Amino acid sequence: MIGAFNCKTYLSARNKLILAIAFDTGARNSEICGIGCQDIRDNVILIHGKGNKERCVPLTPYLKKLMLKYERLRKEYFLDKPLNYGNYLLSRTGRPLTTEALEHVFTKANEKAKVRDTVRCSPHTARHYYAQCNLRNGLDVYSLSRLLGHENINITKRYLQSIQDESIVTLAVQSSPLSNLKL
């Protein structure tokens, strides 16, 4: 889906970045809309979550690269237009993005990528994907819970339920104490 957009225009770079942020940080729809320019740091993005809680999510090299392209195109696009908002991601008119606009970006990417109709594609699906990938790649549930902004790990454990038994068995082999002995 991320490949459905290129970085040749402001809007396509913004849409690609929206998808990348969703899939690479696990941020909620409203959290992505609420990212301010001041929230972008060297290695993290400050996310303003539910209940006015803040958390930091990592800024990966891939995401940094897309952000640099987006910022360059954004600067050119809004060169002669006054920006009255401090939001990082803006609409074509310079206003903050709405959650509906973000969902529309996912719908458009879904269509362009020709994803099967039976597959649900939404910002929340990207959040689930983020959680499951991190668990499959060995991140512990507690750390994932903090990255997702959950109050406790019981909420995060729901993401575990949809990982298939096969995946769990594969993970168990990789994390097996005897398999990881340095003999």
Image (cartoon, grey):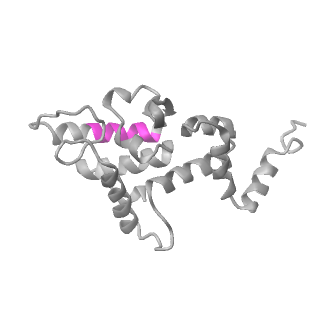
Q: Specify the segment rendered in magenta.
A: 62-71
Residue 158 appears in the figure? yes
Q: Magenta span has 146?
A: no
Where's residue 183, x and y in %? Answer: 91, 37
Farthest residue, direction bottom: 117
**To which quarter of the image does residue 122 belong?**
bottom left
Left or right of residue 80: residue 42: right
Locate the N terminus by quadrant.
bottom left
Pick the front one: 50 or 177: 50
State the residue at coordinates (47%, 37%): 50
Left or right of residue 131: residue 46: left
Left or right of residue 117: residue 87: left
Pick the front one: 164 or 101: 101
Where's residue 145, x and y in %? Answer: 61, 38
State the residue at coordinates (37%, 46%): 17
State the residue at coordinates (30%, 41%): 89
Q: In this view, does 138 lie above or below 166?
A: above
Farthest residue, direction front: 51
Left or right of residue 69: residue 164: right
**To which quarter of the image does residue 82 belong?**
top left
Where's residue 175, x and y in %? Answer: 79, 44
Residue 59 appears in the figure? no
Where's residue 60, x and y in %? Answer: 49, 37
Count the marks: 0
